[in-house]
Amino acid sequence: MSHGIPETDGTHETNEITLARLPSGVALTTTTHTYRGAEEGPTLYVQAAQHGREINGTETLRRFHERLPLESLSGTVVAVPVANPLTFDRVSYTTPEQLDSVNANMNRIWPGDAGGSLHQRMAARLWEEISQADAVIDLHTGSPDMLPHTVYQEGDTRSRRLAEAFGIDLLLSEEADDDASDEWHRRGFAGKLRVAAANEGIPSITPELAHNKQIVEDVVDEGVDGLLDVCRYLGMLPGEIPERDLTVARNHLGQVTATTAGLFRPKPSLEVGQEITAGTPIGTVYDPTTYEPLHEAVADRNGILYALTQEATVVGGDQLASVALIREE
């Protein structure tokens, strides 16, 4: 199904595409939005809600739709506001085991496989659109306790320029492939959309707009501004990108984790976004029945604190905080 809405000097078209089929035979579909300018230019692909609880990306695309000046657009924007309808309906990060017991997390199997598991088939269908793009933006949102940031592949200059244009205050470069840590490989990060696209020579970024399950106005505004500025950077819209004071850091999966189960009380004076040093107290895990302190969590590096959990009930191995290494440039 498709229908077009003509604009003054550009067009907007929606298409319902089939991502896969469920066991009952019901088609699993989603909607793509294609914006074509009157002039030739690059193709930008943007998607949201690959993880269904991360809905600020979806709202960002709705407002981008309202603000995109088609009469000034050169090239094409392809937007997919709900990349994974299954996780969206579950308000979840993963798909039920009954539907994909092999690849529960869609963002670990790109570029997909048309003959593979459910998520692999869904990714392969979207990859048909992605592979035609000149730049890719995969909108995500982290926890409510995370500083908005944009991730790109370390050493990929074109992806870094895309991240700078998007303009979130914190840019995180992530090492990949042979340069990455064992943990990066163990967690299957080679199958992230951003990594798969970059490996195909397509500049790609992952903005983490922060917060999930509820629309946060300033986060969405930042996301829309970022998309419009990327269009300006790519020459798809007129205008200059504003000067910004961006912090660049390396994301070496620098997490402070709980060594045991209990209740976690973060240090009240800490706030995400501040610079901390190795040894800075992060908080205390204590036994809720005896009140005994069980783990005094501290940072293991100097850097910027970009995530600090406020969820008190933890088990051993749970992430308490994330610290990125600031790059000196």
Image (tube, helix red, strand yellow):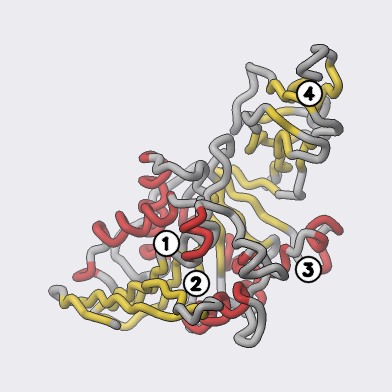
Residue type for callout 3 = Asp
Residue hosting label 3: 177
The residue at the point 60 percent across, 86 percent down is: 114
Residue hosting label 2: 135
Residue type for callout 2 = Ala
Mark 2–mark 3 CB contact (< 8 Å): no
Q: Nearer the viewer, mark 3 or mark 4?
A: 4
Residue 178 lies, with reference to residue 296, above or below; the image says below
Q: CA distance from mark 3 to mark 4?
A: 35 Å
The residue at the point 39 percent across, 73 percent down is: 78
Residue hosting label 4: 285
Label 3 Cα crowd, 10 Å radius (few <14 / some 14-19 / many 20+): some
Residue hosting label 1: 230
Relative depth, front residue between 108 and 279 = 108
Q: Nearer the viewer, mark 2 or mark 4?
A: 4
Q: CA distance from mark 3 to mark 1?
A: 26 Å
Label 4 Cα crowd, 10 Å radius (few <14 / some 14-19 / many 20+): many
Instruction: State the image coordinates of residue 96 (x, y, percent, origin top left).
Output: 62, 61
Q: CA distance from mark 1 to mark 2?
A: 9 Å
Label 1 Cα crowd, 10 Å radius (few <14 / some 14-19 / many 20+): many
Of callouts 3 and 1, the N-terminal one: 3
Residue type for callout 1 = Val
Tag 2, which secondary structure?
strand
Residue type for callout 4 = Val
Residue 163 lies, with reference to residue 284, above or below; the image says below
